[in-house]
Image (tube, rainbow, N blue to C red):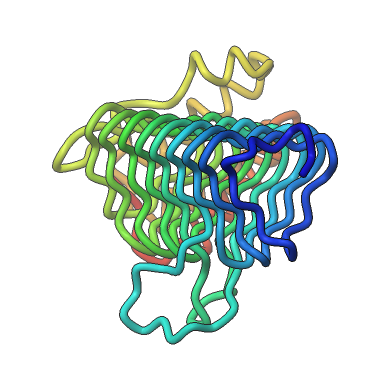
């Protein structure tokens, strides 16, 4: 047994672990698990199912990753959990594999900071650089864009999409899609503004911030229908070419929303 694997850990002979992986005491690694270089698995973790984990992740004690989905329709299909690189996964997190009713994979990106007791259900897609605070819960088929922040005890309804750079306050109930850049809070949910400070920290120029502010106004402050707001946002491309990528992100999100947006 590798010197990096505690003698009380159980690692199935079919598991594929890079020689630099560390596995703590009493952890269990299943036969269909692969773990990349530099990843540290703490004590008392269970990693099972068809689960792939990238490089330099830190998985803290008592995490359960790759268990079958909590879906009554699941019938034992070999669905997957895919976790990227450099993620921090704190104590008691539970991530499930996907289902055949969707793409069959639950996917976590790179550089995410996922705090204790977070649940990520089947078929979720989590982008990069997100922060999920303690007890945040994602129901099945939820999509989170890059840089999303969810406050503690926030619950996200199944099939909801939350756009890039959005932020949810403490104990929010999210049952509709949340457009990129917005700040939401409460139960019932309300849009409180846009994520100005977060965007500044990520290097958004004054021109880009101006465009985001204008999109927020069009969606939430001028009494427009959603269709009229979408047309006005499209017109911003001519006025604010330096923010073209941000406007395109908003347009794409609004065009593909399936649950209606929080307004």
Camera-side residue of 25 and 188:
25
Seen from the viewer's position, the closer of residues 171 and 11 is 11
Position of residue 4 measured from the top left corner of the image (x, y, whole percent): 74, 33
Q: Is residue 153 left or right of residue 35?
A: left
Image quadrant for the N terminus? top right
How far across and how far down the image is residue 38, in percent? 78, 32
Would you say residue 83 is visible in this rendering? Answer: yes
| Nearest to the observer: residue 231 or residue 117 | 117
Residue depicted at 42% across the width and 49% down the height: 94
Single out the residue that lies furthest toward the right: 19
Q: Is residue 123 above or below residue 131?
A: below
Compared with 45, 177 (above or below) is: below
Q: How many marks?
A: 0
For residue 59, which quarter of the picture?
A: top right
- Residue 93 in the image: above or below residue 214: below
Residue 82 lies in quadrant: bottom right
Q: Is residue 196 left or right of residue 176?
A: right
Q: Residue at x 73, y 55 (%)?
A: 34
- Image point 34% across, 60% down: which residue? 260
Q: Is residue 214 left or right of residue 192?
A: right
Inspect this view and state whether residue 165 appears: no
The residue that appears at 39% across and 57% down in the rendered structure is 160
In the rendered view of the protein, which quadrant contains the C terminus? top left
The spot of residue 177 in percent (x, y) is 38, 53
């Amino acid at each position: 047994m590798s010197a990096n694997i505690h003698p009380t850990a159980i690692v199935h002979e079919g598991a594929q672990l890079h020689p630099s992986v560390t596995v703590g005491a009493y952890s269990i690694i299943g036969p269909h698990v692969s773990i990349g270089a530099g990843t540290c698995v703490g004590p008392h973790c269970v990693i099972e199912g068809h689960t792939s984990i990238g490089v330099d992740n830190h998985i803290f004690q008592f995490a359960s990753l790759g268990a079958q989905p909590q879906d009554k329709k699941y019938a034992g299909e070999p669905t997957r959990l895919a976790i990227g690189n450099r993620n921090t996964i704190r104590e008691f997190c539970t991530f499930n594999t996907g289902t055949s009713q969707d793409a069959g994979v639950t996917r976590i990106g790179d550089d995410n900071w996922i705090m204790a007791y977070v649940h990520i259900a089947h078929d979720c897609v989590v982008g990069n650089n997100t922060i999920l605070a303690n007890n945040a819960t994602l129901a099945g088929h939820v999509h989170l864009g890059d840089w999303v922040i969810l406050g503690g005890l926030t619950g996200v309804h199944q099939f909801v999409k939350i756009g890039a750079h959005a932020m949810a306050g403490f104990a929010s109930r999210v049952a509709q899609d949340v457009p990129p850049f917005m700040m939401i809070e409460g139960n019932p949910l309300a849009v409180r503004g846009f994520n100005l400070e977060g965007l500044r920290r990520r290097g958004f120029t004054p021109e880009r911030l101006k465009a985001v502010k204008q999109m927020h106004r069009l969606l939430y402050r001028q009494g427009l229908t959603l269709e009229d707001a979408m047309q006005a946002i499209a017109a911003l491309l001519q006025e604010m070419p330096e923010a073209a990528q941000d406007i395109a992100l908003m347009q794409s999100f609004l065009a593909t929303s399936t649950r209606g947006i929080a307004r």
